[in-house]
Image (cartoon, grey):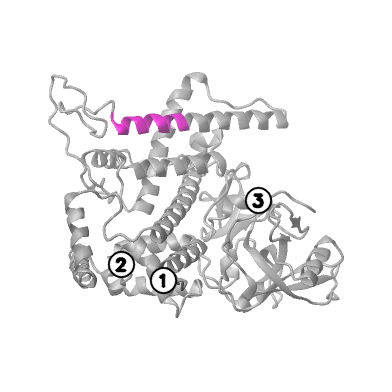
Amino acid sequence: MQSTFTRQTHNTSYVAYSKSASKPIQVQVAGQDSTVPVHSQVLIREFISIEIDSIDDARATSQRQPTLYVKFNARSAKNPDGESVGLRENFGASIQAGGDLEKAVRHALTAGKAVYVAIETKRRYKNSAGEIISYLTPINELRGATKDGKGGSASATRENCANVIAAIGPADAPTTNLISDEVTSDPSKWATFRSNHDGTQVPSGFVRVNTPEGDPTGAITAAESAPAAAPASVDVDALAEAVAARLHGAAPTNGTPAVSGAVRRPALREAHSVEAKPWEPYNSDGRANAGSYLTASWRNTWSGAMILLTTAAYEEQDAAERAGREPCLLESSALASTATDLTEVLLSMADQVQTAVVGRINRMDRSHGEAGKWVHQIASRLVPITLEMLSEEHSEQREMWRKTVVAQATAVFAGALHSVESYLDGQYDQPTPINDASRKAREQAGRQAQQGNAATSTSGAQMTSTNAAIGDAATGDDALMQRWNAFLQQCKLTGHEDRVKPFLAAACGTADLAQIQAQLFSERLSAWEAEPQRFVEAAASAYRASQPVARQSA
């Protein structure tokens, strides 16, 4: 069967869900005992360019149709730049014999052509001991991997899972794809889950289920099948304190991060002053500046909220027509106030994205505007809000929507920043930050240019003392170093740390982990762990740019 679904543009893996629900089983939903059908997890691995190593003979089984085992040449796997990704052990997956998929893989093997392939790892009905495998068990657990999908055991996967080729096509023809009838997930929905590495993301219209004992699971159920949830309680006092703290730059007692670079509000005066410059949040009379960048940002976000609500209304109308019912739309009188409420939510989501990528909250910074735009991109294109989420009985579904959008916006924003850093590292070699026109920066650049190599040791000593002043170095955090080493191993870079140093220098200011603050390195590492393939590609690009260019003799 052919499909026009969109391939991923780089090698990746993530957790998706079965498109068909199971029979109703006993679970807990929102703390209430329920008997509902569930959708179990599957793992999707996409390889953008890889060659077929061999095809085993058809296996004689009791199945209705024999299967073939297709083995892939791991060392032939390439990234978007055509470079090897460093895989060493061949791997494979099965297809049904006698169909278009067999013709496609045999043609690719005979012609020696690279293919795009997506492999779905799904739970077996029973393991080798004859025990029924629960729909609720997370796929990463069945694979013997960590909760975030790292590692994995080949023996555990064979014991509990089956690997099937879900989609395949020529590597150089992205729109030519064959979709297997054996795939249990929906390839047209894969784009929604490509950042769902740990399996915590729940798609719109679904809720997570727990075991009958209340323990978390990997399965989901349609929200319409779930019992109505109790209204969520909100700590209004804590929320008010956090908002006030962000406005005035104080640290709220509940641990919410304070605003970076916050200004102190002038004393409130009865007389009105002249309006301040747009980069100043307050007028001199202590009143908020109605013409500030903050106010403009709020208006832009409100406009985005109206777009999301309008789109949700159109979707509800279409759904109602298909179902032959009356649409449940917002009253015109409530539209503006609903957009205002959604604006506050969207700005808070941008706060979270900015904190994750940049390391601080400051709505006056342009990076906050970028974070907000990424939130809108995800919410308008990949994870749309529905009108039913706005009601109190669907507060849990709305909260899951918020978390999913924040996670995906963080991943793409961080990936964009890493790509920019890699580009800058390859284009520029400056001793001071680009576009830093301060007198201090110019003087520092002059001193470094004059001192040559001597400046390197001086700068290193200054960096070490600076880091010691702000916090512990990354090398002093054993758990952090274990994460870093595990990440290098995952990326097949263990023993090749020198190839990562140029990228570290660009991302952290230095390649010496003893000179990088632990908190900064932990934040950077979290972003890299979310997109390991992007890290590998950015590191490779930075390393190539750092190598001397061979000169041709006259």
Counting residues from the N terminus, which is met first, the one under dot 3 or under dot 1? 3
As drawn, 269 above or below 152? above
User: Hey, what amino acid is under mark 1?
Assistant: Pro
**Circle 2 sits on which residue?**
510
Q: CA distance from mark 3 to mark 2?
A: 38 Å
Identify the element where label 3 is drawn: loop
Identify the element where label 1 is drawn: loop
Classify 10 Å Cα crowding around label 2: few (below 14), some (14-19), many (20 and above): some
Image disc number at residue 6: 3
Identify the element where label 2 is drawn: loop
Q: Is residue 293 magenta?
A: yes
**Residue at 28 percent of width and 67 percent of height:** 516
As drawn, 493 above or below 137? below
Estimate the x, y position of residue 35 in percent, counting from the top left: 64, 51
Magenta region, residue range:
292-304
Counting residues from the N terminus, which is met first, the one under dot 3 or under dot 2? 3
**Circle 1 sits on which residue?**
548
Q: CA distance from mark 1 to mark 2?
A: 19 Å
Residue 246 occupies quadrant: top left
Residue closest to the far bottom: 495
Estimate the x, y position of residue 454 in percent, counting from the top left: 20, 72
**Residue 93 in the figure: left or right of residue 473:** right
